[in-house]
Amino acid sequence: MELLFWIIGFSLLGGLASVMLASSFLLLSENTRAVAVPHLVSFAVGALLGASFLGLIPHALEHKFHVDAHDVGLTLLLGLLAFFLLEKLVLWRHCHHDHCDGHLPDNKLQHSHNRNQAAGTLILVGDTIHNFVDGILIAAAFMTDIHLGIVTALAIAAHEIPQELGDFIILLHSGFTRKKALFYNILSSLGTVVGALIAYFALSDMQHVLPYILIIAASSFIYIAVADLIPGLHNKVKPSETFYQVLLIAAGTIFIFITHNTLH
């Protein structure tokens, strides 16, 4: 039972600590955020793609899981399709209440607003899945060795900070208020505890599922970056603006790469 308390405590640390540290971004003034957020969205694109292609997918393909690469590719494709359909459902729900039609010129602004809201919803879904997986990893480490569990939980909290910052940026960009962005991110972080508890009681049965959960999380991040964030970057077409966008996307990817390799 003592081990369970260790797992719950450090799962909360791994999830909530990164959220609270990243939430310091919300202390910036409205004017500062208005200037910073468009640039940070580019950084978030790089961070999301970096986390997917440099972290989640490679871990899913590790030999210890004995997963067929074709199965991983199929799961990724199905995940992308699933999040496309999920976004459609979110859009249909908003359009049902607001009587909008994305094909009508008069409603392009409303449609764009709804797409932003859908992106915010999807990032929360993807982040919850990611937090759930983090919880499984924390529980597995603690069940191997308490010291390994502590180190793993601290490492997860550290590498989650840039991702949580990206999540805050995306949620604010999607129309969430600062209070709602903080509330939903804290709620999403509780997925770490849920994953840890499930792993603690049924770890042996979860091993074969873990790589597919990683791929589903990756498909969510890829879809958001490519389908929801990158199209918005195309609204700025000046060469200087494009240069800064590419620079920031590269910076986001490199930051994830350095963080990932440092913690390993």
Image: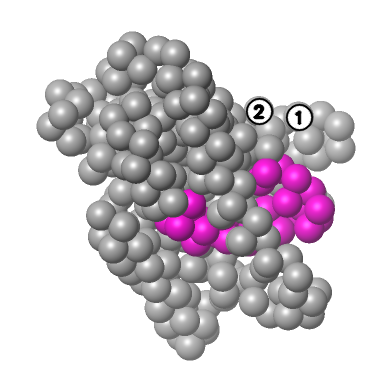
Q: Residue at x 30, y 34 (%)?
A: 145
Tell me whether the residue at label 1 lies in contact with that at label 2, contact meaning CB atoms closer than 8 angstroms.
yes
Residue 5: % across, % down? 54, 29
- What residue does disc 2 label? 89
**SS under mark 2:** helix
Q: Residue at x 49, y 25 (%)?
A: 2
- In three-dimensional space, the C-alpha distance between marks 1 and 2, rounded to whole angstroms, equals 6 Å
Q: Is residue 88 magenta?
A: no
Residue 215: % across, % down? 35, 34
Quarter occupied by the C terminus? bottom left
Task: Count neighbours of disc 1 (C-alpha within 10 A) and say few if under 14, some if 14 to 19, many if 20 or more.
Answer: few
Q: Which of 153 and 62 lies nearest the eye of the viewer?
A: 153
For this orientation, the residue located farthest to the right is 98
238 on left or right of 260:
right
Q: Is residue 234 above or below residue 199?
A: below
Q: Amino acid at mark 2?
A: Leu
Using the image, tell me which numbered label, if any, was put on residue 122.
none
Q: Is residue 67 above or below residue 149?
A: above
State which quadrant residue 178 falls in.
bottom right
Q: Main secondary structure of the magenta part?
A: helix
188 on left or right of 93:
left
Q: Residue at x 16, y 29 (%)?
A: 64
Residue 233 makes an appearance in the image? no
Q: Residue at x 86, y 32 (%)?
A: 97
**Highlighted range, magenta:** 157-186
130 on left or right of 31:
left
Using the image, tell me which numbered label, if any, was put on residue 93.
1
**SS under mark 1:** helix
State which quadrant residue 251 falls in.
bottom left
Q: Amino acid at mark 1?
A: Arg
Q: Is residue 232 above or below residue 101?
A: below
